[in-house]
Structure formats: structure tokens, C-alpha cells
Amino acid sequence: MCLPSREAKIQWLVEMLPVLSPLGRCLVFVATRADCDLLSEKVTNSQALVGNDNSTVVSIHGDKDQRDRNSAIYQFKKNSQAILIATDVAARGLDIPDVMTVINFDAAKNIDSHVHRIGRAGRMSKEDSGQHQRGVAYTLMTDGNADFAQSLVEAFEREGRAVNQELLALSSRSKRFGGGRKKQSKGGLGFGGGDSQTPAQQSHIQRSNQPPGGGSYYGPSADATPVAKRSRWG
């Protein structure tokens, strides 16, 4: 989903985690150790304000020693409504069942990392009868993630998955798609050469020359139902 700013992403996170954590464990990925500490503090304070005593908020990153990491992972596994905020480096190799929600607060560096992240949602527990539990993944994006949106569009098309219009609008601003170029194409749309466009993007351009207004959702990055059609976060 696309939000207008980093501050709006923080607001979305602190407002939505009390809604999502009762459904099961939540794993939040961030890009930096500083954001890991900052978000952990903000989420902890917000949980206290809404009186959500059932959720445990823990974090792991590269600056934490092994004892602190082990303690955080233990608490995350012990509490079915726990929230773990982690960087990619610290979360590498984790094998935790029954994670119902993965939130990419920061987009992954590439599609492989993205797939690895969201694949942690809905893993089957040892007590499960054999059915794979379906999880949900959200990716929070701003206008600065246009190149990553383009990669998502290409990945979705390879998999034969539907691509929503908001994601296409963001991807159309990718440098690889031509959105960063001032030179306009012969069609006058400024999207670059037609050969570089994916079929979904070509179809999108034919339907509308203008992307949707700012602040709309780009939708979950995996199999999830959007929580709203209009943004309340900024």
C-alpha cells in the first residue's frame, strides 16, 4: 500500500498493529537498526495507550547481543499475539511457525528478499493437522519506491497474478519504466519507449493518462484484503 510519507507509515503501523496482533504473531521488517529501535518504542507506547496488554513487542537487529536476540525470539514464540520488529540481517535464518502477518515497513532490497520475507507468513505449526495456514503480508510504500513497485509488477505478471491500478501508477514513475525521464514519448505520455512497458502497464496507460490521487492504497504485497479504500494516514 502506498502512503504519502514516512510519518504516515509510522501512523499506519501503530494504528493497525492493535488490530492485526490479536489475529496472530506479527513480524515487521525495517531497513535500519535506528528504525528498529524507534518503531519498537512507538509501538510499545501505542499498545500501552490502547490497553492492549496481550501483545508483547520485541525487536532484534545487528547491534543487539546474542543473549538479547535469543530473549526476544523466545518471547515472540511464547506469545501468540507477539510483535517482532527486525532488520533483515537479524531475522536471517529465523524459523518461527504461526506468523499470521508480515509487514514490510521498508520495502526489501530486491524481489528475492521480498519473497523470503513474506514467505514467513502462514507457516504451518507442528500441531497443525496438515493444512497450511494462510498468512497476510503488507508492504508500505511511498513515491520513493517506484522502482520496487516496477519489480513487483513484473513479478506478479510472471506469476499470472492480478495487478491493481494503484501499483501500476506507482510503477509508472520508475526510472526503468521511464517515469524519471523528462523526454516524452511520441504518444506524449512521458513514459518512455513502449518496448520497455509491461503488458499490464500498457493496458493501464490506454485506460488513463493520470495516476490516482496521492494517499491511496497500493494494496497488500501478498494475499490480503485491503483494510480500507481511502487513506486515513496523512
Image (tube, rainbow, N blue to C red):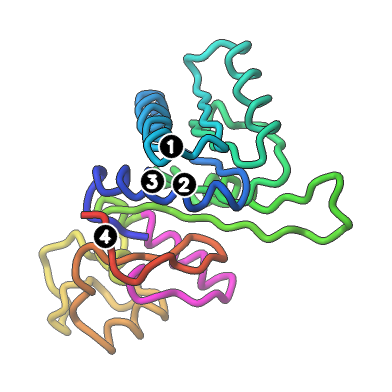
**Secondary structure, magenta segment, majority class:** helix
Residue 220 versus residue 5 in the image, above or below: below
Sequence-first tag of 4 and 2: 2
From the image, state whether disc 3 or disc 2 is nearer to you: 2
- Where residue 99 sits in the image (x, y, percent)? 65, 46
State the residue at coordinates (62%, 48%). Answer: 24
Q: Secondary structure at mark 1?
A: helix
- Where residue 46 sits in the image (x, y, percent)? 37, 37
Q: Residues within 10 Å of mark 3 (few under 14, many from 20)?
A: many
State the extent of the magenta-drawn residues as a range. 148-168
CB-based contact (under 8 Å), mark 1 and mark 3: no
Q: Secondary structure at mark 4?
A: loop
Marks 3/2: CA–CA distance: 9 Å
Sequence-first tag of 1 and 4: 1
Quadrant in which residue 83 is drawn: top right
- Where residue 75 sits in the image (x, y, percent)? 64, 26
Q: Is residue 153 magenta?
A: yes
Q: Which residue is mark 2?
A: 18
Marks 1/4: CA–CA distance: 19 Å
